[in-house]
Image: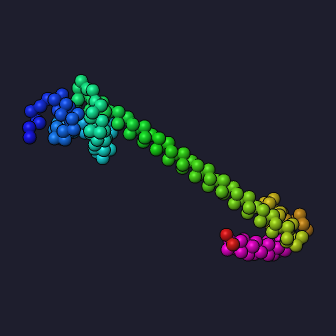
Amino acid sequence: MPAYHVYEDSELLDFVKSGNEAAFDEIYRRHWHSLYHSAYYLLQEEAPAMDIVQDVFVWFWEHRDHLVLTSLRGYLLMAVRYKVANYFRRQKVRAAFAAESIMLSREEGACEQALELKELKAVIASFTAELPERCREVFQLSRQEHLSNREIARQLGVSEKTVENQLTIALKKLRVRLGSMSLLM
């Protein structure tokens, strides 16, 4: 078995083209370090740099019989740069996809909240319609028109205590209604 470390890259490439794994191992030993440093310099991350160099050598071996090169080292360095560029493109696409997903989930959450609010308003409207007339008037003036108990009492010609009692009755009934609904959901 010949000592491949004495051969030039061009000679090793000829051996590799014929399927010589020992010649490929020599190319790997000879160029791995500089390819890794090139990838690491561009990425500033160890694991992706190692993966890229590994991918370049796998691709090189799988396509060895089709290669026409003038400079093996130059070819391998360009392959690393190409893989790094692809890595950055994939990362950019992933980041854009993640941002889009976050935005869609926020929009879904906002839509869901809007639907829940709409449903809650419908339940309260239905509930309000079922209240006795005086209780309904007090509740609507308090919760929809945001009047104080004193203002409601003046407007309806009743005491503030009556307003408080009517609101207490309405709110207790509403809590019961909403509590029974949450059990159904």
Q: From the viewer's side, name the closer residue of 168 and 158.
A: 168
User: Can the viewer see residue 65 in this picture?
Assistant: yes
Outermost residue, front direction? Answer: 18
Q: Is residue 49 above or below residue 174?
A: above
Percent x, y of residue 25: 18, 41
Is residue 137 positioned above or below 113 on the image? Answer: below
The chief SS type of the magenta part is helix
Q: Residue at x 66, y 53 (%)?
A: 111
Of residues 87 and 122, the one drawn nearer to the viewer in this rendering: 87
> Which residues are drawn in magenta?
161-183
Residue in the picture at 8% in, 40% down: 1
Q: Is residue 106 left or right of residue 181?
A: left
* Location of residue 152 by image quarter: bottom right
Quarter-of-image position of residue 3: top left
Instruction: Where is residue 180? Give x, y as percent.
Output: 71, 75
Whether 179 is among the magenta residues is yes
Residue at the spot x=89%, y=63% of the render? Answer: 155
Left or right? Give the position of 4 relative to 52.
left
In the rendered image, residue 124, in percent from the top left (x then y), is placed at 78, 65
Q: Which image quadrant is residue 161 in?
A: bottom right
Question: Could you say which is closer to the camera, residue 68 or residue 37?
Answer: 68
Quarter of the image containing the C terminus?
bottom right
**Residue 37 screen position, x and y as percent:** 24, 37
- Give the total of numbered labels: 0
| Figure colour scheme | rainbow
Inspect the magenta stretch and tell me whether residue 30 lies in it. no
- Which residue does the image show at 27% across and 33% down from the upper left? 65
